[in-house]
Amino acid sequence: MVRFSAFSLSIFTQRLSLLGISLSLCCFNVSPLHAAPTKLGATSFETYISDDGEPARINALLEKVFQKAELDIQLQVMRQAFLGSSVLTGKLDGEFAYINLGENSNDYVLSDIYLPVYLYAVSKEADVEAIKLFPHLKDNRVAIENRFANTPSFRLLKEIKWSRNPTTFDAFRQLADDRAPYLITTQLLARELNILLANDSEETLHFSAKPLAKTGFQIAINKNAARAESIIAKFNQSVSTLQNSGEFNEPLALAWLTKDVNGDGVADFIGHSSITTSTDLIDTAYSLDGTPTSDNSMFYVDGKRYTSLEEACAVLLAKESLSVRESLLDKTVYQQLLRRW
């Protein structure tokens, strides 16, 4: 118990006492406890996820989102076997590039999809353009990456002769070597290969009439992790804000994106002055929510709305040269594949 003396304190003594109390209070607050960062993992995925300096859309994207949301998140890239065991043993709090293709996700708190994944059938031959459903590939040999093949959704497709591959490069090589006439891959990966092929004056891939499966990247945090619900809520809000402002375009290396920004049921076109130019074609826009565009679509540049493409283009710079951008796929790595094409 603290005891106070009965005699009166001098003004000087009173001031010294108050100063001492203030310093004592400061000492209690000078070293506040900081919550440990939330640790999320993922496996490498060409052009999406990397830890060695290669182009990595997801890494760049999430850096912006976490900074906007003021979240302390630590990302780790590792092999699939280590990823699963690390989450199970609690070394990781979850995954930052979770793709749900029929898995049980009851143990996770899931974010909204921050980047959709559209899986197409692609081929050297134009007949793939008639394919609309997986049954149309019945009895055909189809190349696919293990990350997709080893999921419940694809394991149920028994009538397709799957040619499984550990990496994106191996899957593309199946087409180059004519060992499989078809490949299931993401729309963005197929586009990057087409840029590589076009820049090398090779015939580009044909796409199926529509995506055969739709999923997307999410962050998935273990329900028992600290602040899981709060982190997800902040993350979702920041993703929506950055999508609408056009700050997703540059990390994704996409001139135009589409999303229903104003909530009228019609997708709008989203551009950003850091990457979009007045000559970029809107028919290559990548959808962030699957909503179709129409004649009533608005155009957003740097978050500002325009009612027509002409108005939007008026505030965008013209492309300085006619050169096509380089592919995010490493041309040196793919040189052997290009020679086989």
Image (cartoon, rainbow, N blue to C red):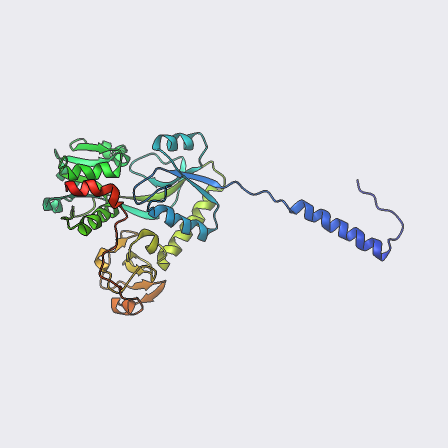
- Residue 338 is situated, as x and y percent measured from the top left of the image, at 18, 43
- 226 with respect to 315 (left or right): right
Q: Quadrant of residue 329?
A: top left
Q: Quadrant of residue 100?
A: top left
| Residue 113 in sight from this viewpoint | no
Q: Is residue 255 above or below residue 162?
A: below
Q: Nearer the viewer, residue 283 or 153?
A: 283
Q: Is residue 327 above or below residue 81?
A: below
**Residue at 44% across / 49% down in the picture?**
66
Q: Nearer the viewer, residue 94 or 254?
A: 254
Q: Is residue 304 above or below residue 139?
A: below
- Residue 263 is situated, as x and y percent measured from the top left of the image, at 33, 59
Quarter of the figure that contains the C terminus: top left
Q: Is residue 249 above or below residue 28?
A: below
**Residue at 29% across / 60% down in the picture?**
268
- 53 with respect to 284 (left or right): right
| Residue 172 in sight from this viewpoint | yes
- Residue 42 is situated, as x and y percent measured from the top left of the image, at 37, 38
Q: Nearer the viewer, residue 323 or 124?
A: 323
- Residue 45 is situated, as x and y percent measured from the top left of the image, at 31, 40
Outermost residue, right side:
7
Quarter of the figure that contains the N terminus: top right
Q: How many marks?
A: 0
